[in-house]
Structure formats: C-alpha cells, structure tokens
Image (tube, helix red, strand yellow):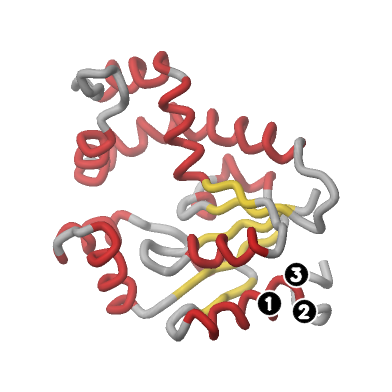
Amino acid sequence: MKTVLLTGPIGSGKSAVSALLRERGIPVYDSDARTKRIYDRRPALVRRLEQVLGLPLRTPDGKLDRARLAARIFADEAARESLEAIVYPAVRQDFLRWREKQQGVPFVVLESAVALAKPLFDSVWNVAVLVTAPEAVRLQRVMERDGMEDAAVRARMAAQQIPWERAQVVLENNGTPEALSQAVEHTFFDKNSYLCKL
C-alpha cells in the first residue's frame, strides 16, 4: 500500500488538506488523534510517562492531563525526547495495523507534523507532501483556532525542528479554500502529478 506522509508546521493547514482527501475517499491516519486514543486505551503508557518525567500527568478521572504534558515537553527538550522514545513506537505500530485494514484505495495518508524528523517512521512512507504557509498566516490561524497567545504559539513553532527539505512535494496553503481544493486535486489526483507517477 503506497503511503503519503502529509506533513507541515503548526498552522499550515494539514487538517484542511486531510479533510479534502477524506472527501475523495482517501483514508487518513491522524497521528494526533490516534495518539490521544492510545493514551486513553493504554493507561500503563501514561504511568510510564509519569515515572520517566517525574510528575503526575492524570486528571481526577484518570485520563491524561494533556495540557500539563504539553507544558512540560514544549519547555524541556530532554522531556520531549523521553516522551518520544516511549510513545512513538506505539504510534508506529498502531499506524501499521491501521494501514493493513485499508483496501481498494490508490494510497493512504499518514498525517504527522513530526514523522519527517523521526527515522523510526522512514520505512512507513513512500513520499512526503509538505503543506506550507507564511509564518504570519500560520500564527494567526493557530491563535484563532486554539485561543492561544502569540508567545505560546511561537514557542510551539520554535519547538518544531523538522527537516522540511526532505519533503518531495510542496503544497502551498496561503489562499482561499477554493485555491486549496484545487491544489489538493492537482497534487494528489492529477495524472501528471509527482504522486500519480510513483
């Protein structure tokens, strides 16, 4: 099964591209959503994170306190690396199981902001599509979407040390929804596109 890695910095519009692909019947693995599901279904994993990071990470109902975890890992590179060593292998395994279930489609999509920088995921994708937009546009999108302050968004942007140049295809998302729809059509479905020639 051919796998497209859909990636890009925070606020670039990966989710909007994913929604357009789903409308065309393409299965999309949302890494963020699936990771949350893994946390919810594997309490032992959360307990392991608490041990390694040295702080409680559960809400009173026993669920992962995502805000507390995010505050820690975005402020502490060593903590982020510890989390990745525990969580990313579980995400990779979950993706491979998910991909095995997909049938009758030309390709599947792995949506992930970080996979391009993680050798653990190199063997699971065939081509990487980078969704991009100017920093000012991305900043405004995230502030409006998540209700975050300017400084908090910039901190998350700075934490994304990703080798974007590894992507083979760039999809610009700095215009209208109609322009994005056309770009998705051309990038993923045009018979002369890079992806369709693979």
Residue at 64 percent across and 58 percent down: it is: 22
Q: Which of marks 1 and 3 is in front?
A: 1
Residue lying at the far front of the rendered structure: 23
Residue 56 at x, y percent in the picture: 20, 20
Which residue in the protein does label 3 denote? 195
Q: Taking 126 as reference, is 22 left or right?
A: left
Q: Residues within 10 Å of mark 2 (few under 14, many from 20)?
A: some
Badge 1 is on which residue?
185
User: What's the distance in space between the residues labelled 2 and 3, CA to CA?
Assistant: 9 Å
Residue bearing the label numbered 2: 190
Give yes or no for contact between labels 2 and 1 (Cβ–Cβ under 8 Å): yes
Helix, strand or loop at mark 1 = helix
Against 6, is 102 above or below? Answer: above
- Seen at 45% across and 44% down, the residue is 32
Q: Could you tell me the amino acid type at mark 2?
A: Asp
Q: Estimate the spatial distance between the alpha carbons at disc 2 and disc 1, rounded to whole Å.
A: 6 Å
Residue 159 image-quadrant placement = bottom left
Frontmost of labels 2 and 3 is: 2
Residue 79 percent location from the top left of the image: 28, 34
Front residue of 70/27: it is: 27
Residue type at mark 1 is: Glu
Question: Which residue: 36% across, 21% down?
Answer: 46
Q: Is residue 58 left or right of residue 166?
A: left
Q: Which amino acid does label 3 sit on?
A: Leu
Question: Of label 2 and label 1, which has the lower sequence position?
Answer: 1
Residue 33 placement (x, y as % from top left): 47, 42
Q: How crowded is mark 3: few (under 14 residues within 10 Å), some or many (20 or more)?
A: many
